[in-house]
Structure formats: C-alpha cells, structure tokens
Image (cartoon, grey):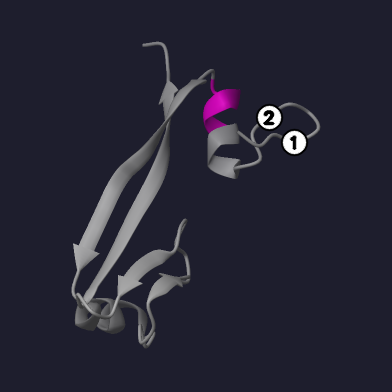
Amino acid sequence: MRSRSDGLPLDRWLRVHVRAGGQIVGIASCSATVQTPLSQWRRWTGLPFDQDGAVVIPGGLVPVLVSITHDIGVYVEPNVWVRHAL
C-alpha cells in the first residue's frame, strides 16, 4: 500500500479511517465486479468502447476490460478492508 512521507496512506479516504483509529487489514482485489454489454458501457460513460483491451473510464479505479468479439466490458474494482474497534 502506498504511503506518504508521514506514514499515512496516500489515499485521502484511507487517511480519514486511519486517523479515526482504523487499522488497514487487507485488500479485496475483486470487491465489485460489473460485467455488461458494451452498449451499456457506452450509455453510462459516453465512450466508444470500439477496441479490445483496457479502457480507462473517468472516475474509475481500474480500467474496463473490453472484448469486442464477446460484446462485453468487465470492470473489477479493488477495495481495502479497514477494521475499527466498536
């Protein structure tokens, strides 16, 4: 996990959690998956999705993996698990 020079996480939302006493306990590499036809990706993003491969979408954490042959775009978003004492 990337950190700043003061040891806090680079990500601002993770810094909020750590400052509030949270402990980073792991990474969920496949936290959210969206698999849908390219026509839907085009409606959502306004992007053409006209080539195979990785397409960067505005605001996305990771690219959408595109298959023109299969008419599908797959977005697999990672996440970070933070534990807080109750």
In this picture, is 53 found above or below 46?
A: above
Which label was assigned to residue 16?
none
Q: Please report the residue visible at 60 percent of the width from the left and 42 percent of the height from the top.
A: 11
Image-quadrant location for residue 29: top left
Circle 1: residue type: Arg
Q: Quadrant of the N terminus?
A: top right
In this picture, is 63 found above or below 5?
A: below
Q: Which stretch did the figure color magenta?
A: 16-20
Question: Mark 1 sits on what residue?
Answer: 4
Q: Please report the residue visible at 44 percent of the width from the left and 72 percent of the height from the top.
A: 55
| Left or right, 60 with reference to 45 | right
Quick one: which residue is furthest to the right in this view? Answer: 5
Circle 2: residue type: Leu
Q: Please report the residue visible at 26 percent of the width from the left and 83 percent of the height from the top.
A: 43
Gap between marks 1 and 2 measured at Cα: 6 Å
Camera-nearest residue between 72 and 58: 72
Q: Quadrant of the C terminus?
A: top left
Q: Are marks 1 and 2 in contact (CB under 8 Å)?
A: yes
Q: Position of residue 65 (x, y in %)?
A: 36, 66
Residue 70 part of the magenta-drawn span = no
Question: Mark 2 sits on what residue?
Answer: 8
